Amino acid sequence: MNKGNHGIKNITVVGTGVIGNGWIARFLANGFDVIAFDPAEGAKERTTKAIAQAWPSLEKLGLAEGAHQSRITFKETVEEAVRGADYIQENVPEREALKKAVLADIDKYAKPEAIIGSSTSGIVPSILQEGLKHPQRLIVAHPFNPVYILPLVELVGGKQTDAAIMEHARQFFQEIGMKPLIIQKEIEGHLADRLMEALWREALHMVNDGVATTEEVDAAIVYGAGLRWAQMGPFMTFHLAGGEKGMRHMLEQFGPALKLPWTKLEAPELTDELKEKVINGCESHAGDTTIAELETKRNEFLVELLDLVESYWPESKAAVKN
Amino acid sequence: MNKGNHGIKNITVVGTGVIGNGWIARFLANGFDVIAFDPAEGAKERTTKAIAQAWPSLEKLGLAEGAHQSRITFKETVEEAVRGADYIQENVPEREALKKAVLADIDKYAKPEAIIGSSTSGIVPSILQEGLKHPQRLIVAHPFNPVYILPLVELVGGKQTDAAIMEHARQFFQEIGMKPLIIQKEIEGHLADRLMEALWREALHMVNDGVATTEEVDAAIVYGAGLRWAQMGPFMTFHLAGGEKGMRHMLEQFGPALKLPWTKLEAPELTDELKEKVINGCESHAGDTTIAELETKRNEFLVELLDLVESYWPESKAAVKN
């Protein structure tokens, strides 16, 4: 490895729960040696098992030359673990004081030019870098489970983060098969988790209010929006639902619904400025492709996706045609 | 057709926008004759075009015997259109007064035993059936775009809806390749749109607050949660993200985040009762399948899905491995 000018060769993972182990599997599959630290009893065994569970998928996705499950070494202290690292991924439990203490330790023993990425799903980097000796090399690098398959990683810089560090991190994650998304403003929950959390909170309300069971909520996503969201996010989905006039028509038709108590979440005011942002965003994303062309592609994709879903989850197969 | 005891043979579609035309294409592909009504100029031509656009997908999904694009007839009045219908699908614009006026007209001219389904995405059926002569045959049958491919249809009964009518409708939709989901309580936005609307509102906030562009919001869904949601809803997804202890661990770890201002949506209180509902829901949904088995299946699915996404949307392809 090491194709960009980020200089990342030695990787350390601190904290080996579901997310930490997911990172380890991804790094190993990309041909890195990985050093790990986790004070919990049985951590090493759980990591070995998690790597083995992930490996068949990683083989299918394609292993880098020399990649091997065994290229992982556990160390007894943070100091030993981070000493030689060029990149350190922190994944300890989501408690601010704990994260800050562990990050201070990592910062103390890592070489000053090493990049530190935190997997935090909610805490902003400006808070995490407070009190570090070298705060400029701290970023949020927030992945999604399963980390070894899903490509998204949100990169967020804090007030003190060095722009060059962000760029090196972006290159690095792209090289290990990910889709790094640099978040423009640091906010609690970053971007993807805010979207998911909004849906999640409403889902909990639905269960709490007796509107649906958890299984019915899941079905309401899987057989509808979920199939669409595997290829298009909410904006492009609605752009296509608006017919030939796309998002412009959609906002005219369903904009007023934002005033209705359809969720427990208060919607923003649909000002002309916001409207134009949304419409222009969709139109520029679509580029020269017409709505009809996008529709054709979406349809062909959905048909194959449905086949795929049914082959894995036969219980989802709808009634046989007569 | 006509396999259940619902007696549905003749179908009428009133209102032929994107949703109405989607229904027409699905009904035609299932071997029905369809009668349509829409007072807008050029409606017939737009419908013909929409059916042609949908047809290749429907062919791939499998047409019923005798199914043909040409088996659609437009009528000049609601009276003529609904006279012989066993099932009438209403899809006029989402304005309560307009819907109620059109439904009253349909109710007046349709035979009393015909079932009337409204595609309304937000209005509850108890309101729509007010003032009808035969309110017991009015249900909400809310589909998702593209209606001819996505299997989900939400069925909602109002205070006056006959339970036998709901059951006939459920059988009918199942027979035409759909996943009918009967919603336990009528609320504005039913179930799926409430979930989507929560995400949509938060997405608008993100764009409005300058956190992300529409394209970045879409990427944050597509490359992360979207890939998961094509096979699992939010509950099962989190059940698997919780490691061996599943949802129980997930709620312990991320439950406290519900108190944080991560979204503009206020979360429900995570009472013991709600916790148990959620945990038991996931465990009973998983049944005898272990988390590890579910993980394996999920991974295999995701690998194939990623291949599929990349074959249709090559720009989504991540960096080539070295």
Image (tube, coloured by chain):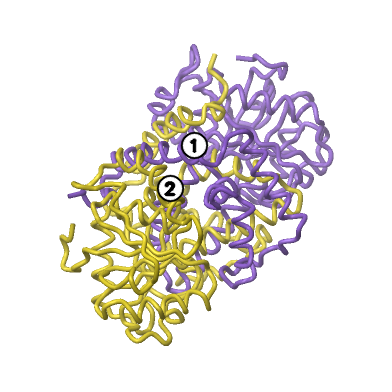
Chain colours: A yellow, B purple
What residue is drawn where x is 23% and y is 52%?
A31
- In x, y percent, where is residue A52? 39, 43
Q: Quadrant of residue A119?
A: bottom left
- In x, y percent, where is residue B101? 72, 43
Judge from the rendering whether residue A19 lies leftward or rightward of residue B128; answer left or right.
Answer: left
| Amino acid, disc 2 | Ala
Q: Which numbered tag is attached to residue B43?
A: 1
- In x, y percent, where is residue A60? 30, 38
Residue toward you, A170 or B12: A170
The subunit letter for the residue under badge 1 reads B
Judge whether A32 appears above or below A54 on screen.
below
Considering the numbered disc 1 on the image, is that residue within a helix, a strand or a loop? helix
Q: Quadrant of residue A320?
A: top right
Residue on which disc 2 sits:
A50
Badge 1 crowding class, 10 Å Cα cut-off, few under 14, some 14 to 19, many 20 or more, is some
Which label sits in the foreground, 1 or 2? 2
- In x, y percent, where is residue A81? 34, 68
Q: How far apart in space, not on screen, are marks 1 and 2 (Cα)?
A: 57 Å
Judge whether A2 appears above or below B195 on screen.
below
Tell me if I can see residue B264 in this picture: yes
Looking at the rendered structure, whether the residues under marks 1 and 2 are on a common chain is answered as no
What residue is drawn where x is 71% and y is 51%?
A207
